[in-house]
Amino acid sequence: MAAALAALDEGRTPERPVFREAVRALLATLADRVPGRSVEVRVPPYGAVQCIPGPRHTRGTPPNVVELDPTTWLELATGRLSWADAVAEGRVRVSGVRTDLSAHLPLRPNDQSP
């Protein structure tokens, strides 16, 4: 993850495998810390997870979806960008009433609470 963040800090796009691994690791951390199946967080082309307790979705497009690009996801998950700023800047696309992730971000390394 450090390599991906260093590349972004330098204004470069991280190498694809580095970017993919960082995105997936942070998505897995979110799913571990806030288990559930009521919200799907999508970071194309690298991954998606379901999280947040609540009504479970089983078929078709979930009613609660958060979609964002890999750079925005890394910035949000590491605290370099706030949820409010990302939404205001149009960097996050949300649908559904359960899609506010601000209580769960950033993903601090030693914080095990949802």
Image: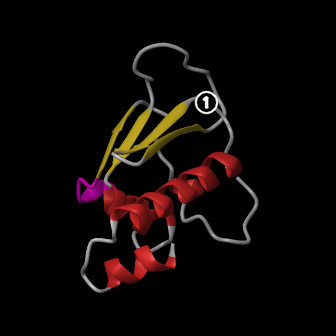
Judging depth in this view, the residue of 101 and 19 nearest the camera is 19
Quadrant of res 111: bottom right
Quadrant of res 103: bottom right
Residue at the spot 49% in from the left edge and 72% down from the top edge: 79
- In the picture provided, is 27 more to the left or to the right than 15? right
Q: Position of residue 85 (x, y in %)?
A: 33, 64
Residue at the spot 34% in from the left edge and 46% down from the top edge: 45
Judging depth in this view, the residue of 46 and 93 nearest the camera is 46
- Compared with residue 4, is residue 33 higher up or lower down, i.e. above or below? above
Q: For the residue labelled by badge 1, is the local secondary structure a helix, a strand or a loop?
A: loop
Residue 82 makes an appearance in the image: no
**How many tags in the picture?**
1
- Compared with residue 56, is residue 82 higher up or lower down, i.e. above or below? below
Q: Position of residue 3 (x, y in %)?
A: 45, 79
Residue at the spot 34% in from the left edge and 80% down from the top edge: 7
Residue at the spot 59% in from the left edge and 64% down from the top edge: 107
Residue reaching furthest to the top? 59
Residue reaching furthest to the bottom? 10
Query: Does the stretch in magenta take in 90?
Result: yes
Which range is magenta? 87-91
Give the class, few, some or many, for how many residues have Cα within 10 Å of label 1's Cα (few <14, many ≥20).
Answer: some
Q: Residue flagged by tag 1: what amino acid is it?
A: Arg
